[in-house]
Amino acid sequence: MAQIRSFRDYIANRFYNELFNAVSDYMEQNHSNLDVSSRRVHNIDSAELSDISLKHVFIENLPGMKIAFDVLLEAEFEISETDRHNDCHDEKTQWFKISCTGDLSRNLVDFSIEAVEVYNSKDKQLNPMSDSLVPIIKSEQLEAVAKDFLERYYQEALYKPMAIDPNILAKRMGLSVELKHITSDFSLFGQVFFADCETEYYNKEASEYTRTQVKRGTIFVDPDAYFLRNLGSVHNTIVHECVHWDKHRKAFELERLYNEYATQIKCQVIGGMKENKVWSATDWMEWHANALTPRIQMPLTQAKIKAAELIREYFKRYPEAKLIDIMEAVIDEMALFFFVSRLAAKIRMVDIGIEEAVGTFTYIDGRYVKPHAFKTGAIKRNQTYSISERDAAFESSVNPVLREKIQSGHYLFVDSHFCINDPRYISYDEYGQALLTDYARHHIDECCLVFDLAIQRTANSYGKQFYTECVLFRDATSDIVFEAHYSDSKINDDVDAQAIAILAYNKELAEIMKQLPGGFTESLKMLMTWKEKTVEGLADASYLDPKTIQRMRNNDDYEPSLETIVAICIALQLPPAASYALINRSTHALGVSEKHFAYDFLIRSWYTKPILECNAMLQRLGFDPLTKEK
């Protein structure tokens, strides 16, 4: 179904004569009542139709394969007035509405015109369809549409929490499920057939494609989905194809009116909505199936009941725990109970109003980010508090507003967050590693800056809604790459106000900066004394040779590399102001290259990290380490 099919064009081509005759008959019977003005014709004695042009078709979805549709057309006609002296004529146009019905399962051979009238306004439609015969379903209608689906096929799921058995669902819908390898590369998970046909599947044992006869209403599911993905994904695939059958047979029949050999819809079930502003009928159908499937598998009311039950159970086990601390376990329990994926369960938890689920199961830079919580409505779905090292380095260097905040010394980059540099929010483990405190994780909106997320790269062509869901589930194995951009918003202004209120100006640092000598060697000595670092201790912390440090301390003509000086600043854990003062007293300066952006980030936001971690981060960004490991 790659081509875009138009029901309006089909009606215009196939039923032009019927529509023309209907309007012509109407004019013949109602010419005196035509509401047209003319300087030449004052009393219309006759009206003769010359041409019609279809402008639009408003389609109403009826039960079964029937549809009702109003054809809006512009009619060109001649009106005339006859008297004893002469005849008067004038050319006019008028819009008409032709109300029609038909049955797609009969290829519209029963096409019928029910009424003809002058068009004044569009009638309200209860179940509208697009020009491609795809149901028009708004986001706010999804829950109701899913409920209607269950009322027709799986009522018991509306009365108590339960897992939908997709095989029972398919059987009730008159469908059959077969396990077939659809492709050799597992690029297609599911396939539904709308007509009897001959098709092919991949014979894994013979390593070749094999032809087979398939009956209408057959669903193929790739058995590798059980092993390469999970049972939740298999259930999702079958329900997904059932949704296609229920919602999109009429779109398929329109395709058959154009192409009698059309037989199937193939699905990767990758989710989402296209980046392109203009969607095709196939895009809409995939969105319907992707959006409705989890709502069918986890009906709104029953999902709320089950989530509340699980939360109560976990609070009984861990009475001192906060909701965010048990949320990942609850999500996994939800996924197991409803036989859905962890992603589907997490998104559903957010849908039903449990926003603590947003801060769970996040992986950035290949590492797990501990769960965090924030006030309801604190951020939008395309925003996050958690960002990658690369984005943190880049944004803190090129965004002037963020750069100013970081330069203030009020923030550190800790556990993938820009957090207020205060003991209430940041603690240190036995190895001196900075960590977010439990209080910070439970009140992340109070102490961390917000970033807007945008997709940089994805292996599939779906974007907007899909990536907002992926924001909620940034998996370690995901092929989606995000870019985070600092959000210059009131949210961050509030956090900044909190930082300013908490962090008093460091008088000790101010005093050191006043006393700092003008030369590099003497400044280094003073900063080492302030930080109580010996040459040997600094050498160990920086992974530099002690002789190199001695030369920097004692030889004014010695010019260390910029990397060496940055390593010294990190090893001394100097505040950003002191680091920049030391660099400015050398022969170097930080420029605007990507590598220097990374150095700037280390100095401003990672200066509490060990040198090996800083080196590792630089290597992840594609740069050489500051120093070599001993």
Image (tube, rainbow, N blue to C red):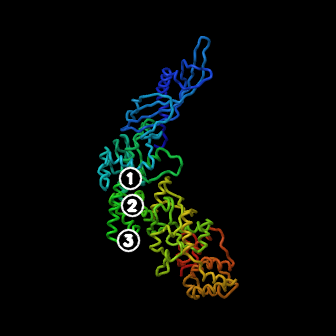
In the rendered structure, which amino acid carries the disc numbered 1? Arg
Residue topped by disc 1: 295
Q: Are marks 3 and 2 in contact (CB under 8 Å)?
A: no
Picture coordinates of residue 401 (x, y %)? 61, 66
Dot 3 falls on a residue whose secondary structure is loop
In the rendered structure, which amino acid carries the disc numbered 3? Ala
Pointer 2 or 1: first along the chain: 1
Please tell me whether mark 3 or mark 2 is closer to you in this view.
Answer: 3
Q: State the CA–CA distance, disc 2 to disc 1.
A: 14 Å
Picture coordinates of residue 435 (x, y %)? 48, 75
Residue topped by disc 2: 342
In the rendered structure, which amino acid carries the disc numbered 2? Arg
Q: Which one is nearer the viewer's eye here, 16 or 29?
A: 29
Pointer 1 or 3: first along the chain: 1
Mark 1 crowdedness (10 Å alpha carbons): few <14, some 14-19, many ≥20? many
Residue topped by disc 3: 321
Q: Which one is nearer the viewer's eye here, 53 or 207?
A: 53
Pointer 3 or 2: first along the chain: 3
